[in-house]
Image (cartoon, rainbow, N blue to C red):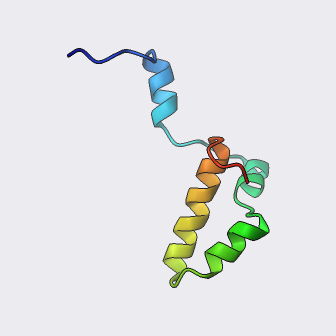
């Protein structure tokens, strides 16, 4: 079965590439609300905390997180 073509080449590249943030956007997207900060501090290792912060910021930037 053929795959459905949804995006053109430029749209597909934009969808697949990570977002690029300026200084103000980094502050906005990677500052966590209290509820998420409480969840982050329960993680055991600093590596897990950083991964949690980056994931939350990415989803917030891509409008997948309503926090």
Name the residue located 70 percent from the left edge and 59 percent from the top edge.
30
Exactly how many numbered labels are in the figure?
0
Along the viewing direction, whichever of 47 and 34 lies nearer the viewer: 34
| Residue 62 place in picture, x, y as percent | 62, 41
Residue 26 in which image quadrant? bottom right
For this orientation, the residue located farthest to the left is 1
Measured along the vertical axis of the image, is residue 58 above or below residue 50?
above
Name the residue located 66 percent from the left edge and 45 percent from the top edge.
61
Name the residue located 44 percent from the left edge and 17 percent from the top edge.
6
Is 33 on the left or on the right of 53, as rendered?
A: right
Measured along the vertical axis of the image, is residue 37 above or below residue 29?
below
Is 36 on the left or on the right of 15, as rendered?
A: right
| Residue 60 place in picture, x, y as percent | 66, 49
Query: In which quadrant is the C terminus drawn?
Result: bottom right
Along the viewing direction, whichever of 13 and 52 lies nearer the viewer: 52
Query: In which quadrant is the N terminus drawn?
Result: top left
| Residue 49 place in picture, x, y as percent | 57, 74
Residue 36 in which image quadrant? bottom right
For this orientation, the residue located farthest to the bottom is 44
| Residue 54 place in picture, x, y as percent | 58, 60
């Amino acid at each position: 079965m053929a795959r459905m073509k949804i995006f053109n080449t430029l749209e597909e590249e934009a969808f697949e590439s990570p977002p690029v943030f300026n200084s103000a956007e980094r502050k906005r997207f990677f500052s966590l609300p209290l509820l998420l900060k409480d969840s982050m501090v329960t993680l055991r290792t600093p590596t897990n905390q950083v991964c949690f912060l980056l994931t939350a910021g990415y989803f917030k930037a891509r409008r997948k997180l309503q926090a």
